[in-house]
Image (spheres, rainbow, N blue to C red):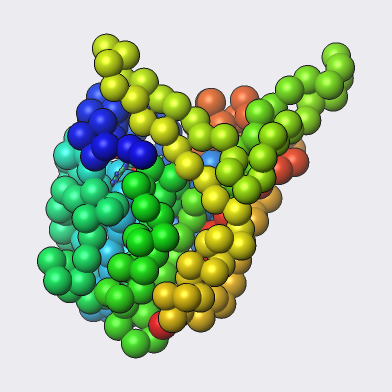
């Protein structure tokens, strides 16, 4: 189980490089690497002026900044102060208001944070200590009719990619029910964080037993990278980096993320 201090240390020292090598647009809502943004997917609920939104594990909160541009009242939270500082700067440069607060995923609760019309998170849940509890607490924090949008690591992609022969690559997943986690070390190798994916049915049942109605699930396919111009790539995907482009063949064949959209 991850310690918040380990998550903070790892992400504080990773933040600069993450924000530098990853193009994360504030002009669209991203679901994951090389995936079409919401302008194309059109899955987000209607964003209205004054709508209260909370992002957890926000990083620099580019998705929150996108919602703020539509008039939403956005709070971005993350364990890493460095990540949030990037967000503050990006929002200021765009002339948009973004509230930030340093908080771990497992710390979020109604008493300290209040209630919201939309709670969203993109690829941060695998770092939480207790993902089921986080879902339950988010459900408690939603106003009636409010939305929870969770994009997290797809349990199948948690397997290991291996070459079957010179030409064919495939996934080896030793255990779908407890997919292997990824371990990431801090620079001094004294601390580490481990990610944990869960079966689709676990997430669906956590959402349903929190009293939310599951409205939609997404397993998005990436944009057609090889046939698009650079301009089209920038226009169609809000989240991109050279590392992800190298992994295109893999994420084209197996979804890297899964998105759950639920309403109270
Ligand atoms: C892959 S990044 C994604 C950031 C952002 N959601 C995005 O889409 O760019 C994972 C984020 O989770 C945050 N994180 C990791 N462990 C956390 C924890 N225990 N509590 C809150 N945030 C955490 C990291 O600081 C990092 O910003």
Classify the position of the N terminus by image quarter: top left
Image position, residue 3 (x, y; %): 26, 37
Residue at screen point 68% across, 50% down: 221
Residue at horizontal 78%, vertical 30%?
170
Which residue is the extreme one toward the bottom?
144
User: Can residue 40 be seen?
Assistant: no
Q: Which of the two residues, 185 or 85, is positioned nearer the viewer here?
A: 185
Q: Is residue 198 visible?
A: yes
Q: Nearer the viewer, residue 6 or 54?
A: 6
Q: Nearer the viewer, residue 218 or 157?
A: 157
61 to 119, vertically: above or below: above
Residue drawn at (53%, 26%) of the image:
242
Count of numbered labels shown in the rendering: 0
Where is residue 249 shown, x and y percent of the image? 72, 32
How far across and down, in percent of the image, does residue 212 sit?
A: 45, 79
Q: Is residue 169 left or right of residue 116?
A: right
Is 67 situated left or right of 169 in this image?
left
Q: Is residue 116 above or below residue 93?
A: below
* Quarter where residue 53 is shown: bottom left
The residue positioned 40% from the left and 55% from the top of the image is: 131
Q: Is residue 5 left or right of residue 146?
A: left
In the rendered view of the protein, which quadrant contains the C terminus? bottom left
Q: Position of residue 117 (x, y in %)?
A: 31, 77
Ligand 1 placement by image quarter: top left
């Amino acid at each position: 189980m991850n310690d918040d201090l380990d998550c903070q240390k790892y992400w504080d020292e990773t933040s600069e490089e993450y924000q530098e090598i990853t193009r994360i647009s504030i002009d669209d809502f991203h679901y994951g690497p090389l995936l079409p943004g919401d302008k194309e997917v059109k899955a987000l609920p209607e964003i209205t002026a004054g709508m209260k939104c909370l992002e957890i594990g926000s990083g620099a909160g580019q998705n929150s900044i996108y919602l703020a541009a539509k008039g939403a009242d956005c709070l971005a939270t993350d364990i890493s102060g460095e990540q949030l500082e990037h967000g503050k700067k990006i929002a200021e440069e765009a002339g948009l208001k973004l509230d930030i607060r340093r908080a771990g995923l497992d710390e979020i609760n109604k008493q300290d944070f209040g209630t919201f019309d939309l709670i969203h998170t993109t690829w941060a849940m695998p770092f939480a200590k207790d993902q089921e509890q986080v879902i339950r607490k988010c459900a408690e924090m939603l106003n009636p009719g409010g939305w929870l949008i969770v994009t997290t690591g797809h349990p199948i992609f948690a397997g290991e990619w291996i070459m079957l022969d010179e030409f064919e690559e495939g996934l080896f997943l030793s255990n779908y029910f407890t997919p292997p986690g990824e371990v990431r070390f801090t620079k001094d190798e004294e601390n580490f964080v481990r990610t944990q994916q869960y079966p689709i049915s676990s997430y669906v049942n956590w959402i349903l037993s929190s009293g939310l109605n599951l409205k939609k699930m997404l397993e998005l396919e990436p944009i057609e990278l090889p046939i698009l111009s650079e301009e089209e790539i920038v226009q169609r995907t809000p989240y991109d980096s050279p590392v992800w482009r190298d992994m295109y063949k893999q994420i084209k064949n197996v979804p890297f993320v899964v998105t759950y959209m639920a309403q109270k």
